[in-house]
Image (cartoon, rainbow, N blue to C red):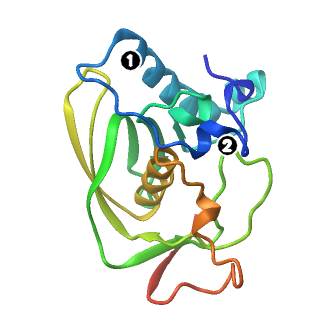
Amino acid sequence: MITMQDIVREGHPSLRKVADDVALPPSKEDQEILIKLLEYVKNSQDPEISAKYGLRSGVGLAAPQINVSKRMLAVHVTDNKGTLYSYALFNPKIISHSVEKAYLTSGEGCLSVDRAVPGYVPRYARVTVKGWDVEGNEVKIRLKGLPAIVFQHEIDHLNGIMFYDHIDEKNPLSPIPDALPIER
């Protein structure tokens, strides 16, 4: 089980490295890591389990955040209609995206960042992500709204990018032109 002690914090070198592709079909070890990533995100959203183990609630986690520099991530998030997006993927990549941008009005947070970083993070409003599930089967997902933002945040981790790298330093809270504001 992954705990908060396993999650590396900003400044750790693995958060700034471009992660390596996972060889497919996945090894047993890689499958176990991927399962544990999703398990953490689910457990962190369960009030009893998160209290018992001191887990900070999250909607996504990427392997570099546990000091594993491989392209794998897990997302467990519900959109504004109540649809659950629960995925654990190897080698995920954005294969298409909208021109339109979106941002969370509350800003973004990160399990690897122990401080509030105010500011709007411009993201694509809609993305299509392709990856491979724990068994090595290809998966293609069309996303919009909060799930699209969460996937982009986690994929950034695989490329050594932190969410605050996208924030306008001079005007962190100035609305992003022509972007869709998303309440969370």
Q: Position of residue 27 (x, y in %)?
A: 33, 13
Q: Which mark is residue 39?
A: none
Q: Which residue appears at 55% of the width and 35% of the height?
A: 64
Q: Which residue appears at 43% of the width and 51% of the height?
A: 151
In terms of image quadrants, where is residue 66? Answer: top right
Mark 1 vs 2: CB contact within 8 A:
no
Give the structural element (helix, strand or loop) at label 1: helix
Quadrant that contains the C terminus:
bottom right
Say which amino acid is labelled 2: Leu
Most foreground residue, 92 or 46: 92
How dense is the environment of label 2, judged by Cα within 10 Å: few (below 14), some, or many (20 and up)?
many
Give the structural element (helix, strand or loop) at label 2: loop
105 above or below 28? below
How dense is the environment of label 1, judged by Cα within 10 Å: few (below 14), some, or many (20 and up)?
some
Q: Which residue appears at 48% of the width and 29% of the height?
A: 38
Q: Position of residue 181 (x, y in %)?
A: 52, 78
Please say whether residue 45 is visible from this viewpoint.
no
65 above or below 11? above
Describe residue 121's horizontal placement relative to residue 32 as left or right. Answer: right
Q: Which residue appears at 20% of the width and 28% of the height?
A: 137
Say which amino acid is labelled 1: Gln
Task: Report the residue that reaches farthest toward the bottom.
Answer: 177
Q: Which residue is mark 1?
A: 31
Describe residue 29's horizontal placement relative to residue 173 as left or right. Answer: left
Please say whether residue 154 is visible from this viewpoint.
yes
Quadrant that contains the N terminus:
top right
Most foreground residue, 143 or 14: 14
17 above or below 152? above
55 above or below 135? below
Cα–Cα gap, marks 1 and 2: 22 Å
Q: Which residue is mark 2?
A: 111
